[in-house]
Amino acid sequence: MRPVSRAGVFSAMEIAASGLTAERGRMNVIASNLANAKTTKTADGTPYKRLDPVFVAEPLRETGGDPVLHAATTVRLSQVRPDTSPGQMVYEPGHPDANEKGYVEYPNVNVVTEMVNLMTASRAYEAGVTSIESVKSMAKAALKIGQ
């Protein structure tokens, strides 16, 4: 019987933890978008621009010759970039931020889309927690076998 690889257990946890961190960052970006969905004027005088998280996969850089561990990757939030799509123009002549024609440019944030993104991020986070719990259970079971 082959002994349980400590590197494999810890690598699986590291991979799952990287996903948790990335999804937490994604949820923070989504929360910012939702909080600013009606912000028509930021510090620079323009409407809020929706932010978009960008993930990148990185090799685990596991030492050793195990081809499975060599192919494993972690994920991280590499940047948060503004969405360049135009905002929505709404006719509100009495609004303090209305232009000369009476239109106000609202942020390019779609609340329904953001809520779907938030649910997706939440489910991915839950999946990461479940995978960590599974790895912990397998490690405990392996330790009991070895006793």
Image (cartoon, rainbow, N blue to C red):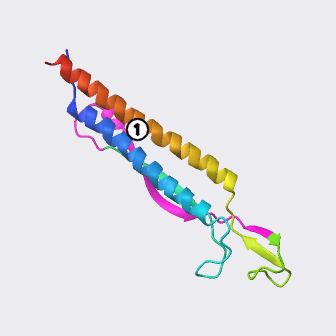
Q: Say what amino acid the circle numbered 1 marks.
A: Val
SS for dot 1: helix
Please provide percent x and percent y for residue 58.
39, 48
The residue lying at 74 percent from left, 81 percent from top is: 97
- Nearer to us in this view, 56 or 16: 16
- Nearer to us in this view, 117 or 39: 39
Q: Is the residue 29 above or below the residue 6 in the image?
A: below
Name the image quarter holding the N terminus. top left
Please provide percent x and percent y for residue 127.
46, 36
> Dot 1 corresponds to which residue?
129
- Nearer to us in this view, 91 or 49: 91
The residue lying at 32 percent from left, 38 percent from top is: 13
Can residue 40 be spotted in the picture?
yes
The residue lying at 48 percent from left, 61 percent from top is: 79
Q: Is the residue 133 above or below the residue 51 in the image?
A: above
Outermost residue, bottom direction?
100
Name the image quarter holding the C terminus. top left
- The magenta stretch spans residue 107: no
Please provide percent x and percent y for residue 88.
76, 66
Residue 47, image quadrant: bottom right
- In the visual, does 90 lie left or right of 139? right
Q: Residues within 10 Å of mark 1 (few under 14, many from 20)?
A: some
How many marks the image carries: the answer is 1
Please provide percent x and percent y for residue 122.
52, 44
Q: Is the residue 32 above or below the residue 138 in the image?
A: below
- In the visual, does 40 lie left or right of 91? left
Q: Which residues are magenta?
A: 61-89
The residue lying at 51 percent from left, 62 percent from top is: 80
Q: Is the residue 108 above or below the residue 24 in the image?
A: below
- Nearer to us in this view, 106 or 5: 106
